[in-house]
Image: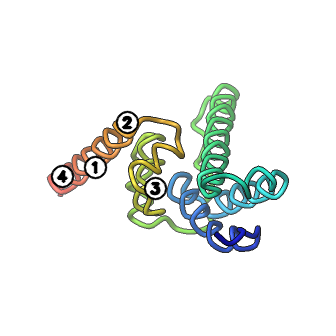
Amino acid sequence: MAELSFEDLIRQQYPLLVAVGVAVLGRVDVARDLAQETMARAHANWATVATADVPEAWLRRVMNNLVTDHLRRQRVEQRALERLESRPVPESTVTTSPTRMDELLALLPERQRLVVALTYVCDLSVADVAAALDIAPGTVKASLWKARHNLEKHLNDERSSR
């Protein structure tokens, strides 16, 4: 097997990492920042990444952790702002208008969004998603089922309110 180069890994995986970030976070700028941080960490740990059985899984795990950390920080900041102000905090301005899919994904809980993004944006198998998120394949399947059910319910509610 040919040795994997860092440049090849970036070329192959960076767009997928950004796509997952956008699908989960809804913001291209933050997704790019987190994907770049993932690549910086891969470079700093290249001896480990290059010899990993599946270097892509290492990248997905780091990206998942960074996205989770970002969402956690965002929630902490939001709660702090709400305590400081009596009126609701306006939503941050998004530099790109969200697509319909972004709007629908935003309705899902964090884990369901992540599982949907890895499955449909990155085209990963259930086993690969389970490995990337360190969860059981059954949990991936259940999350996908719940996500589809939640989206179907929302779309049906939307149709009936017209």
- Nearer-N-terminus badge (4/2): 2
Whole-percent x, y for residue 14 in the image: 65, 67
Kindly identify the amino acid type of the residue bearing the numbered disc 1.
Arg
* Residue topped by disc 2: 139
First-in-chain label (3 vs 4): 3
Q: Secondary structure at mark 2?
A: helix
Badge 3 density bin: few <14, some 14–19, many ≥20, Cα 10 Å: many
Q: Position of residue 4 (x, y in %)?
A: 71, 68
What is the C-alpha distance between the residues marked 4 and 2? 25 Å
Of the residues shown, which amino acid type is indicated by label 4?
Asn
Closer to the camera: disc 3 or disc 4? Answer: 3
Residue 80: name its quadrant.
top right
Pointers 3 and 1 in contact (C-beta within 8 Å): no
Q: Which label sits on residue 156? A: 4
82, 135: nearer the viewer: 135
The Cα–Cα distance between marks 1 and 2, rounded to whole angstroms, is 14 Å
Q: Are marks 4 and 1 in contact (CB under 8 Å)?
A: no
- CA gap between label 4 and label 1 equals 12 Å
Q: For numbered disc 4, what is the local secondary structure? A: helix
Query: Quick one: 101 or 1, which is closer to the camera?
Result: 1
For label 1, the SS is: helix
Q: Report the mark closest to the observer, 1 or 2.
A: 2
Three-letter code for the amino acid on which mark 3 is drawn? Ala
